[in-house]
Structure formats: C-alpha cells, structure tokens
C-alpha cells in the first residue's frame, strides 16, 4: 500500500469511529433518560415529592400550578405534592400512571 492509500484508509476509519461515537452517545443519553423516567414514576407512585423535585435542574421553572402561579428554582417548588397529599381520594392519580 502506498502512503496515500494508507492515509485514505485511515481517514475512512476515523470517519467510521466518529459516527460510532455519536451513536454511542445517543444510546447512553437514551439510557439516562430511561433512568430518570423510572425514578420519576417510582417517586410519584410512592408520593416522594422531594425526590421528584430533585430530578429537575436547579433553575427549574414551575409554571401555572396552582392556577397562574410561577415559581423558579427547586427550593420554591418543594410544595409540588401538596395539592395531592392533602386532597382526599387522590390515590387514583398515581395508580393510573
């Protein structure tokens, strides 16, 4: 093989490696999303509302619940589960997820 052929082959292999790395990154992202989804559903079903809030970014914005109220940041959203934990007969909300 000539040097030019080797360089061409190396470039092809580098391109393949780049594509495979992108695919791997996507697959890893999907698995992380699945883990967060599982943790969210588990915490919601177990009524562990602080655990749910911990899944969100520190600068999260909770908009429109309760009606028209907006809260920014995890600390202000710690009341997330209050409407459901205080209301009688709300078990069905969690059982249908």
Image (spheres, rainbow, N blue to C red):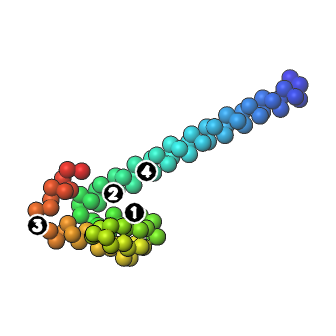
Q: Mark 2 points at which residue?
A: 40
Dot 3 lies on which element? loop
Q: Would residue 96 be seen by someone viewing this image from the given angle?
A: yes
Q: Would you name the residue on which mark 4 appears?
A: 33
Distance from the alpha carbon under mark 2 to that under mark 1 = 7 Å
Determine the secondary structure under disc 2: helix
Measured as percent of width and height from the top left, residue 3 is found at 89, 29
> Which one is in front, 1 or 25?
25
**Residue at left offset 50%, top offset 48%:** 29
Residue 83 is situated, as x and y percent measured from the top left of the image, at: 21, 69
**Residue at the image point whose x is 61% and y is 37% from the top:** 20
Q: At 15% across and 55% down in the image, what residue appears?
A: 92
> CB atoms at circles 4 and 1 under 8 Å apart?
no
Q: Distance between the residues labelled 3 and 1?
A: 26 Å
Mark 3 or mark 2, whichever is nearer to me: 3
Q: What element carries label 4?
A: helix
**Does residue 9 appear to the left or right of 78 in the view shown?**
right
Relative height, residue 41 to residue 13 (above, below): below
- Please state which of residues 85 and 10 is positioned toward the viewer in this rendering: 85
**Sequence-first disc among 4 and 3:** 4
Camera-side mark, 4 or 3: 3
Q: Name the residue under label 3.
A: 88
The dot on residue 55 is 1
Q: Distance between the residues labelled 3 and 2?
A: 22 Å
Of pointers 3 and 2, the one earlier in the residue sequence: 2
> Is the C-beta separation of discs 3 and 1 under 8 Å?
no
Counting residues from the start of the chain, the first of labels 2 and 1 encountered is 2
The image quarter containing residue 79 is bottom left
């Amino acid at each position: 093989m000539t040097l030019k052929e080797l360089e061409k082959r190396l470039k092809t292999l580098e391109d393949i490696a780049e594509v495979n790395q992108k695919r791997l990154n996507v697959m890893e992202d999907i698995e992380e999303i699945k883990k967060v989804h599982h943790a969210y559903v588990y915490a919601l079903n177990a009524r562990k509302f602080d655990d749910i809030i911990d899944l969100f970014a520190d600068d999260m914005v909770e908009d429109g619940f309760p009606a028209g109220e907006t809260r920014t940041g995890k600390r202000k959203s710690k009341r997330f589960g209050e409407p459901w934990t205080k209301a009688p007969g709300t078990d069905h909300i969690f059982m249908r997820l």
